Image: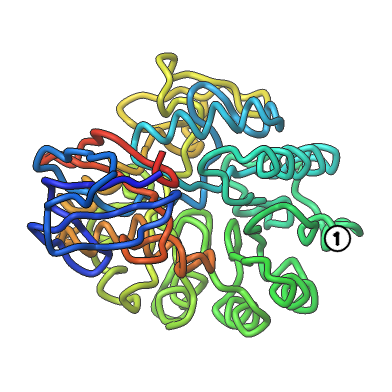
């Protein structure tokens, strides 16, 4: 099937262009044409003057549409989460399984393998956030689930059919050999829920850590004499950091400082979304704890932040409005940079020849009008 997207502004991943059309065949971009006149025998898609951008990519999604991956690690749950986030412009995501027992981890892995085999649109892999963390920085994670590395962990995380695998660990509580083995097998290892010193964080980076999970949150801070994990993350020029731009997890001023410090291209938007995103009922249960979502903030009865009620379109709007980031860079933080972190930037994150036709259509207020995954 051939399609021609016309009568809109096109963000290629580099710049916004006018008067161009995008030709798609079998789910792949085959031309970015400096003409809005469609070729013959194409389905013409009128963008009505709106902005066509690469679809958003979210590497940390706990739930959505009332579903939580930890509660129901199965294909039906994955399908619900994917549909819930797609309405907010997310065309690729990693369902995230937080610290839990070994049986739950195995079920989560099998669900993702089945979902990928079935071709669930937008499912790109899995993120295991824990359980090999530091209990002192556990956040909402259950202390009894945080533990040393299970004997079969390496085998599970490097199983075939999982797509791109991300795992969050506390580098002070796992060995450099474990990190190195994961990295050499292609797993994206992140530091998070960690009380590591700067030196311990640097050792983790040297061993193969390539990312930091929700910068500032649940990690040792940057101080005058101890740079901590935050300092290591901002100083490093190779690794990526995820940020939750909801106004609750991090003060906008702190994020502006971080953006000024971190190498451009290495900061990506994440939601850390919970079941409340895309759901009418904003309250839910997380591992036995009642979580309330009010005013965009998800928290336990004790006031502990428990993920977010943020969607990617909202993160994009907040970044543009509160962080003084230009629109083009904001869109890259939601698409190209996470694609690069996942090693998928040769096929996702741009509207360019040879790239998958994963698009989001945005109006002037950056509300989502429509999405396409592989042209559909």
Q: Nearer the viewer, residue 255 or 266?
A: 266
Query: What's the residue at 45%, 68% (across, down)?
Result: 345
Q: For residue 247, say whether it is visible.
A: no
Most extreme residue toward the front is: 40
User: x%, y% of residue 91?
Assistant: 43, 44
Q: Residues within 10 Å of mark 1 (few under 14, many from 20)?
A: few
Is 170 situated left or right of 364 in this image?
Answer: right
Q: Which quarter shows the C terminus? A: top left
User: x%, y% of residue 16?
Assistant: 15, 61
For the rendered model, the colour scheme is: rainbow
Most extreme residue toward the right is: 151
Is 207 situated left or right of 94 in this image?
Answer: right
Pointer 1 residue: 155
Q: Nearer the viewer, residue 339 or 352?
A: 352
Q: For residue 285, say whether it is visible.
A: yes
37 is higher (above) or lower (below) than 265: above
Q: Quadrant of residue 353?
A: bottom left
Name the secondary structure under disc 1: helix
163 is higher (above) or lower (below) than 88: below
Q: Nearer the viewer, residue 273 or 255?
A: 273
Query: What's the residue at 62%, 48% (across, down)?
Result: 138
- Number of callouts: 1
Q: Which quarter shows the N terminus? A: top left
User: x%, y% of residue 319?
Assistant: 23, 53
User: x%, y% of residue 64?
Assistant: 49, 29
240 is higher (above) or lower (below) than 106: below
Query: What's the residue at 73%, 57% (across, down)?
Result: 132
Is 203 situated left or right of 218 in this image?
Answer: right
Is 6 situated left or right of 258 in this image?
Answer: left
């Amino acid at each position: 099937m051939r399609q021609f997207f016309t009568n809109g502004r096109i963000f290629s991943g580099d710049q916004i262009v006018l008067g161009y059309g995008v030709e798609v065949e079998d789910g792949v971009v085959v031309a970015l044409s400096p003409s809005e006149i469609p070729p013959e025998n194409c389905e013409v898609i009128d963008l009505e003057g709106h902005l066509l951008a690469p679809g958003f990519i979210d590497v940390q999604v706990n739930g959505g549409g009332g579903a939580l991956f930890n509660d129901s690690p199965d294909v039906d749950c994955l399908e619900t989460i994917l549909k819930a986030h797609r309405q907010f412009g997310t065309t690729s995501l990693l369902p995230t399984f937080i610290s839990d027992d070994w049986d739950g981890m195995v079920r989560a892995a099998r669900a993702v393998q089945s979902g990928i085999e079935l071709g669930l649109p937008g499912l790109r892999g899995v993120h295991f956030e824990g359980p090999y963390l530091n209990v002192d920085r556990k956040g909402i994670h259950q202390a009894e689930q945080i533990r040393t590395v299970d004997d079969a962990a390496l085998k599970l995380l490097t199983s075939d059919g999982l797509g791109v695998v991300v795992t969050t660990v506390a580098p002070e509580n796992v060995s450099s050999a474990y990190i190195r083995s994961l990295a050499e097998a292609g797993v994206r290892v992140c530091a998070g829920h960690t009380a590591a010193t700067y030196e311990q964080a640097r050792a983790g980076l040297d061993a193969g850590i390539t990312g930091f999970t929700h910068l500032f949150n649940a990690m040792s801070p940057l101080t005058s004499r101890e740079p901590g994990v935050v300092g290591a993350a901002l100083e490093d020029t190779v690794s990526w950091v995820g940020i939750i731009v909801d106004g609750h997890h991090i003060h906008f001023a702190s994020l502006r400082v971080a953006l000024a410090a971190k190498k451009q291209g290495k900061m990506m938007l994440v939601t850390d979304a919970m079941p409340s995103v895309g759901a009418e009922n904003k309250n839910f249960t997380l591992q036995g704890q009642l979580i309330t979502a009010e005013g965009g903030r998800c928290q336990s009865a004790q006031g502990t932040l428990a993920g977010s009620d943020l969607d990617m379109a909202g993160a994009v709007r907040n970044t543009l409005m509160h962080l003084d980031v230009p629109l083009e860079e904001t869109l890259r933080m939601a698409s190209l940079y996470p694609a690069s972190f996942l090693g998928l930037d040769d096929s996702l994150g741009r509207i360019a020849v040879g790239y998958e036709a994963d698009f989001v259509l945005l109006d002037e207020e950056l509300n989502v009008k429509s999405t396409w995954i592989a042209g559909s």
